[in-house]
Image: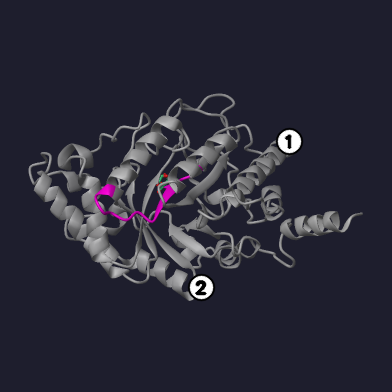
């Protein structure tokens, strides 16, 4: 063999990475590429779920709170803040030297009705709602200043057709509720990264709307560190090509792209609505919970292949991806067991109900280093 061919071959071999030698965890396998995270429930961050907490410590280096920093949990009544659970969440992250994410400040779901009402139950005025938003953001972000690394400031403000979603925030304040949220967050913690987070941005109309939104914010001098693609995926949606276009579209704006709520739903669809609208309700019918007794090998293999394809794509974009966070730890913890119909048996994550790694875990660990996207 000619020397140049030998050199080329050994260069190629050096670029190919099965799990790096000795890597037994996701965080080690992708060290230097991006962080790997999980959304945590209280049982995990208090250690009550000992097996779950052990997986979190060994596998992940960034965490997101599944619910405890949402408005309804942390600020349930006017003037009443409850920091007991989020304090434990942050302490867990600090004790384990993890990158701690805050989720989420301004969203239309899991926000109590009083936030949007005056004392007579009529819609609050713009000024009242802005004052409440500012107070909330200052209290919550201020408390964890220099501890929480970055915040999902606005969650899900864009509709499927790319227009601004009609929500109590946009209806009462107007479209500039978004700018206001980011400037309050910036005041409250000048050092924190601020993110925009949404689902189904892989679909062109919604993505175009989000691109326009980020551009507008940038033109107003607001610094968005990253766009979060929630990543509530299916076996057949989005295509790798859609994902590729989406990551490129946001990277072209000079922002990072994080995968913030990754899971892959293998169950049959029971709604016709958009992928991850938490208020969607499906109709249970014969066949809608097909794997209650276990996941057939054929589907297990499809899931593993899907995860391998996704991580290969993430690796191609590792220059712009800072973190890939799963929405849960083991299959038993996932919201997809109860959404959009209650009581199904779902298999969307890399660890099973006994916290054992699934074939999808092995597939992700074997993902080879892809050439960087030029
Ligand atoms: C959205 C939210 C998350 C979570 C998921 C599903 O994606 O951003 O906080 O509620 O829905 O549970």
In the depicted structure, whether residue 130 falls above or below residue 54: above
Query: Is disc 1 surrounded by few (<14), some (14 to 19) or many (20+) residues within 10 Å?
Result: few
Q: Is residue 77 magenta?
A: no
248 horizontally vs 308: left or right = left
| Residue ID for mark 1 | 298
Q: Is residue 43 visible?
A: yes
Q: Main secondary structure of the magenta part?
A: loop
Q: Residue 291 location in percent, x, y?
A: 64, 36
In the depicted structure, whether residue 356 falls above or below residue 339: below
Real-space Cα separation, disc 2 to disc 1, in angstroms: 37 Å
Question: What kind of element bears circle 2?
Answer: loop
Residue 188 position by quadrant: bottom left
| Residue ID for mark 2 | 96
Q: Which residues are magenta?
A: 219-231
Q: Is residue 230 magenta?
A: yes
Q: Residue 66 location in percent, x, y?
A: 43, 54
């Amino acid at each position: 063999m000619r020397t140049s061919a030998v050199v080329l071959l050994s260069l190629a071999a050096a670029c190919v990475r099965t799990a790096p030698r000795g890597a037994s965890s996701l965080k080690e396998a992708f060290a230097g590429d991006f962080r790997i995270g999980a959304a945590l429930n209280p049982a995990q961050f208090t250690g009550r779920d000992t097996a779950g907490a052990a997986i979190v410590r060994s596998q992940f280096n960034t965490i997101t709170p599944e619910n405890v920093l949402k408005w309804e949990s942390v600020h349930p009544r006017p003037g009443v803040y409850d920091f007991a659970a989020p304090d434990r969440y942050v302490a867990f992250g600090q004790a384990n030297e993890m990158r701690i994410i805050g989720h989420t400040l301004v969203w239309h779901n899991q926000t109590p009705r009083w936030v949007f009402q005056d004392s007579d139950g009529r819609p609050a005025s713009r000024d009242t709602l802005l004052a409440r938003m500012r107070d909330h953001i200052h209290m919550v972000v201020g408390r964890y200043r220099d501890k929480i690394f970055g915040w999902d400031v606005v969650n899900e403000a864009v509709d499927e057709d790319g227009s601004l979603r009609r929500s109590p925030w946009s209806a009462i304040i107007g479209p500039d509720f978004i700018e206001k949220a980011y400037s309050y967050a910036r005041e409250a913690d000048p050092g924190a990264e601020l993110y925009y987070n949404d689902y189904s941005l892989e679909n062109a109309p919604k993505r175009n709307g989000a691109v326009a939104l980020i551009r507008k914010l940038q033109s107003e001098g607001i610094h968005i560190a990253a766009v979060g693609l929630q990543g509530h995926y299916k076996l057949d949606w989005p295509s790798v090509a859609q994902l590729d276009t989406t990551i490129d579209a946001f990277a072209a704006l000079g922002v990072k792209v994080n995968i913030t709520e990754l899971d892959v739903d293998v169950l049959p669809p029971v709604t016709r609505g958009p992928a991850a609208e938490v208020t969607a309700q499906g109709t249970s019918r014969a066949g809608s919970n097909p794997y209650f007794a276990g996941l057939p090998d054929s589907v297990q293999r499809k899931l593993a292949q899907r995860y391998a394809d996704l991580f290969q794509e993430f690796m191609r974009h590792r220059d712009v991806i800072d973190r890939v966070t799963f929405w849960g730890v083991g299959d038993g913890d996932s919201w997809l067991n109860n959404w959009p119909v209650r009581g199904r048996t779902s298999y969307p994550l890399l660890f099973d109900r006994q916290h054992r790694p699934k074939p999808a875990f092995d597939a992700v660990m074997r993902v080879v280093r892809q050439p960087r996207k030029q």
